[in-house]
Amino acid sequence: MSLTKFALEKRTIVIAFVVVFLMWGLYVFQNISRREDPTFTIRTSLISTSWPGATAEDVENLITDVIEEEIQSVDEIEEIESTSYVGLSIVKIDLYEVGLPVREINDVWDKVQKKLNDIEERLPPGANTPYLNRDFGDTSAMLLGIYENPSTTQKRVYSPRDLEKISDRLKDRLRQLPSIGKVNKHGVEEEAIYIETDMGRWSQLKLTLGELRDVLQNHNIVSSGGNIDTNYSRFSIKPSGEISDVKEFEQVIIGNDETGNSVLLKDLNLKVSRRYLEPYQVKVRYVDPHRSAPCIVLSLIMKDGKNIVELGEEVKRTIEEVKSTSLPKNIEVAILSDVPTQVKQSIDSFVVSLMQSIVLVIAVALILIGLRVAIVMATAIPVVMISSIGLMYLFDVDLNTMSIAALIIALGMLVDNAIEVCDNVHHFIREGYDKRTAVISGVNQIAFPIFIATMTTVCAFAPMLTLPGGSGEYVRSIPIVVCISLLFSYFLAVTFTSIMAYCFMKEGKSTSPIGYVWNCVTFVLQKVKKRNSQPRPLFEILCSAAIRYKALTLLAALAFMIFSFGLLATGKIPNQFFPNAQRNQFTIVVELPNGSPIAETNQTMKNLEKIVQVQSKGRLHNMVSFVGKGGPRFFLSISPEHPKANSATLIINTTSPYVVDSYIQDIESAVYRGIPQSKIRPVTGARTKIVKLLKGPPVPYPVEIRVRGENVSGLRAYAKQIEHILRQTPGTKLVHNSWENMSYQLGVEVDEDKANLAGVNNASIAQTLNAFFSGYYLTTYRERDHKVSVYLRLPASQRANLALLDQIYVEGRFGKVPLDELAVVQPRWQLAKIVRRNQTREIGVRCQVTTDTLPDRIVRHIMPQIKKMQQELPKEYKIEIAGEHKESQESGGNMSRAFTISLVLIILCLVVQYNSFTKTWIVLATIPLAFSGSFFGLYLTANPLGFMTMLGLLSLAGIVINVAIVLIEFIEHRIHESWANKENLATENNNYLGLTKEAFRHCVVMGTKQRIVPIMLTTLTTVGGLIPLIASGDPLFAPMAVTISSGLIFSTVLALFIVPAIYCFFVENLKVRTVTKSDDSSH
């Protein structure tokens, strides 16, 4: 018993199951996890180790190299990239994407942490403990800014510490929300307690740095006194001793004088003060069109499996509650990044597109077939979509950009299944069959062909599940959703849609609106020509001509295909694996020369903030600047900058995503020229990089060329050559290299003989210099959970005076000795930054691209020069193309392997359908022909070829294969009918599949003619459903929609004229028997 017959006999059961699926889908839709991007495990961590005052080369040799040597034995690590700065080592670890399950990643980080624990004793004195940041990939769901908003006449009343305490009230409430995993705080200005000494005074004291540290730490203890057990109870002992007030430091007894009296800290003329860390490490400001104020930023990380839209609503309610109950009136909370709103808009847009598609299907079907058939077809769309969302949940897929894209991709194909069923049932009814017979026979005739067609599309998408690592995680929802929706749509088409057809379609002949129009045209033509015979339909004339002149038809199709593929091969259609995101956000990263103080970076950033404010013209909503660090990761593809005094980041929120491009252009102009009428100077002495948000996995630089080797001068020389090449290339800007400029250093050249005689070692000299100018850590002052470090240092006037270096006294075994008697201080240049990859030094030459330029065009332009340079390089140097080009090549290679698997599975499906390689190749030949229409469409609309267009090509291939399979099925059904009726059978010299040539061609034409309505329905409904996406200009979905639409338009011509010509070519010219009388039983 066929599924259709079972469905008609057991209608109640089928309808009950459909209702259950609908209810389940609606329930899941209300409660399913929503997020902007799919859950994506960034297999990267950072190891940061500070060593204040050390040169970049010393950091490289004594810290970075030690860490790299130790962790390289961890088998799961694919790549180690390190950057050695002055006083800081950053080691970035990337894990293998293939063969390493997500569940094992934390175990790998545990291994790395153990390795780091093992090397602590091997690090140089003064180096801090290496810190492993496992949360490098955490992406914020929301960013909140807490700032003071005084009136124009009121001064700020809250200190940075006060603002931090106030922000903790909101933070504590937010952490209680069920959807919140973590709340991280950014922009906290650290406090410090400074014990300052005059240089001359310290030289006279018989007190060393170590002695002062020991005295303070022994006095400021936090220690248990143990326990006392009695017969009745157990008592814990808590001795006093912890300093509870800053003034108590002055009362600490340092020692005794010559008379035996106690000497207090204040007696030594050492000044104790509590203030904010100098120089400050970070500054964070909230800025909008009307104000600028220091702020604390809270970064909210959502738990896995939660609904981000609900999280946004909960957070906004909590903010209002806390503001009304716990926050001062002049404290404001601004939303600086609002992913929940973005996700809600995406889902709302998808629902609107779905509604538009349903209306369009009804409208098109109403015109071509009639109202009743239109209702039956349109019913399938919401049923399949809603049920698919319910099934998505069972496969742990949430609503995100990729799953919504998958539903859009599946939309055209699932409509096609409903169209095939309805049209064929409608055809059988017109032929005079009763409804029951028409439904069963009509569906059964095409059930297997459309099943194979559905399976070929499933086979096209399913291999994407084999994509490894992060890319595989990112796109995992696409093959799952497409396969679920297509398989469900097939079973719905042969069951529920069949029931709907049985209930709604009327027996007897019916005429659609377009049928009435055609009848009127025919009547007029008959009257004009004054004859009773009907004119031959235009389609029959055109299709017959395409078959008669099939060589010309096929040559024209081949020429168009070569032309379209040539557009791709010659770079007329650029490559961009993932496009820019359509967000109302962008960032500006500012980098000053290495060695620039953070105060200068802060002033540069204030000037840039004014430029952004003045250039707003109603386009700025708000922004937040992070000086000294890159801020939190608020978007998947944005990797925060490392904490550096010469770096700052600005996150800008505009009033609309559609004003971003014009706003960026105005800001860029003002950055280089200033705004004279507003007395705002240009941003000079800094590299200002404006970055639009990019969809997909992170790519730090759009264009990057890497040079590897060990010799510093050689690396710098080759990097300069590449910089010159890039600067001469149109479309590039902000060309620079990863090592950047040299920085200034004061070298202290110690005379070893004099130092030995004075009992002074190099470590003592370094410790003294570091103490006086950077601060020497003594102890920690505690206020409950708030900790403040205590340092000894010189006063500001002496720290900033280089001439006083000669007056410094260093500690030796025999007392304190003037530094100028032991060493000579000389200024010199030093490397500020050394980059290595897999323990080999490397310079990356990078650049940004102009708004109208894609990175792929730049790489294509410079490749001849880079290849020539490679040939001339010594063997110890290597050049590698990185950036977006490398990511596209690697991801494209993985996609190519998946496509190869898809092709093999599709061929197997077609062989199962036809038991013939010939017809399999006929069907496969339609795919590149359809793709040529897509490439031509991309060229005309200036859209790039990327990941989403590849998905569009897969979707198009599924639709085209479906059309070709069913078309060939109907052509051969006509041939079988001619055999059965014994009409126009072949003669000895005129034998084409057992028919005469004229009869054979007539079967091809009439079989194709029977497919006009469903083919036109598929094209019009699918293209119509994608028009809103094309019109939106969405950089992610518009290229995919153009790919499917333009390919479908061309495939309509392909199906109606070229496929018949190909079929006739195989039969008439190659003498291939595509069908035999032994197959007749199947028809």
Image: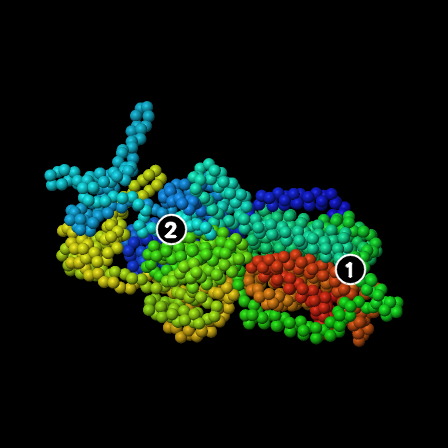
Which residue appears at 31% of the width and 24% of the height?
A: 231
Q: Pinpoint residue 15: horizontal percent, then vertical percent.
A: 71, 44
Look at 19% across and 59% down and name the residue there.
823
Question: Could you say where residue 260 lies in the image, as x and y percent from the top left?
Answer: 12, 38
Q: Position of residue 982 (x, y in %)?
A: 84, 66
Number of the label disc, if any, that sits on residue 514 = 1
Circles 1, 2 touching at the beta carbon (< 8 Å): no
Q: Locate residue 739 relative to residue 1042 in the image: left or right.
A: left
Near mark 2 (Cα within 10 A), the count class, few <14, some 14-19 or many ≥20, is: many
Above or below: residue 942 compared with residue 334: below
Question: Where is mark 2, residue-wise?
Answer: 283
Q: Amino acid at mark 2?
A: Lys
Residue 12 visible (yes or no): yes
Instruction: State the SS at label 2.
Output: strand
Q: Nearer the viewer, residue 550 or 595?
A: 595
For the image shown, how many numbered marks are present on the structure? Answer: 2
